[in-house]
Image (tube, helix red, strand yellow):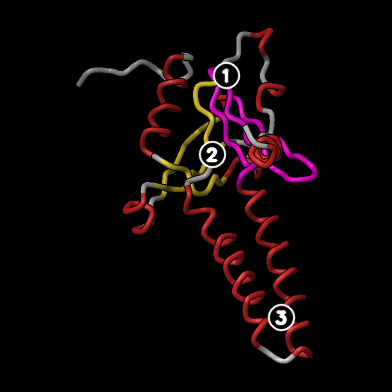
Amino acid sequence: MSFVSSVVLRLGDPNISKHLLRDEGEVVVDEVTHHWFAYLRPGAEGIAALLLLVASWFVAVEVGWFFIIVAVVLLSHASWGWLAVLRDRFVITNMRVFRVHGVLSQSLATMPLSRILDISVKKPLHGRVLGFGHFCFESAAQEQGLRDIKYVGRPDERDLSIQRVVQRAGLRGPRVPN
C-alpha cells in the first residue's frame, strides 16, 4: 500500500468501531457511505480549479495571479467537501442507527431502534436512474443529526435492512396474516 493511499484511508475512516457497545452485544448490520453522486460537486470544483491553473499560463501575469489564487481557494474548498463526504457514515446496528460525520471535529447522532417511528425514502428521478435515494427518519424527539441522510446507495435494500433489524428486535408487532 502506498503512502498516499494509506493517508487517504486514514483521513476517510471515522473509526466506527469506537462507537459500538461491544459489551452489550452490538454489531454492525450495515455501514453506509455516500453514493458516488455526492462526490460530483467537489469533483467539479476540483476540475474547475485545475482549468483555472492551466488558464493562468495563457493570460497576462497580472490576471494570472488572480486565476491562481481563485484556483487554490476552489481546490481547497473541493478537497474539504470531498473529505466531508468521505467521512460521513450512517451505521445500522442491531440496537440503533447512528451517524458519524465531520472533518476536524466529529459529530455523532444516535437513535435507538425503538424511537424510529417512520422511515421515508425519497428517490428523485436521477436518483432512481443512478441508484441512490435520501432517507428521512421520523422520531418522537426529531434528532436533527439523523433526520435526513442524503445520497444513500441502494436505498431500497438499506430500508429493508433497517426494517428487518427492527422486526428482529421485536420492536414492531408480528405480521398478522390477511
The quarter of the image holding the C terminus is: top left
Q: Amino acid at mark 2?
A: Thr
The amino acid beneath tag 3 is Phe
Q: Which of labels 2 and 3 is toward the front? A: 3
Instruction: Say whether residue 143 is visible.
Output: no
Residue 5 counted in the magenta span: no
Mark 2: give few (<14), some (14-19) or many (20+) Cα within 10 Å. Answer: some
- Residue under label 2: 33
The kind of secondary structure element at disc 1 is: loop
Q: Marks 3 and 1: which is nearer the front? A: 3
- Foreground: disc 2 or disc 1: 2
Residue 106's disc is none
Q: Is residue 91 magenta?
A: yes
Query: Splitting the image into 4 quarters, where does residue 8 fall?
Result: top right
Residue at 57% over, 19% down: 95
Residue 140 percent across, percent down from the top left: 60, 36
- Circle 1 packing at 10 Å, graded few (<14), some (14-19), many (20+), is many
In the shown orientation, is residue 171 left or right of residue 12? left
Whichever of callouts 3 and 1 sits on the residue coming sooner in the sequence is 3
**Where residue 56 appears, x then y in whole percent?**
68, 81
The kind of secondary structure element at disc 3 is helix
In this rendered view, identify the residue nearer to me: 10 or 15: 10
- Whole-angstrom CA distance, mark 3 to mark 1, is 51 Å
Q: Which region is colored magenta?
A: 86-112
Q: Which residue is mark 3?
A: 67
- Check if mark 3's residue and mark 1's residue have beta carbons within 8 Å: no
Instruction: Say which label, 2 or 1, has the lower sequence index.
Output: 2
Identify residue for label 1.
95
Dominant secondary structure (helix, strand or loop) of the stretch shown in magenta: strand
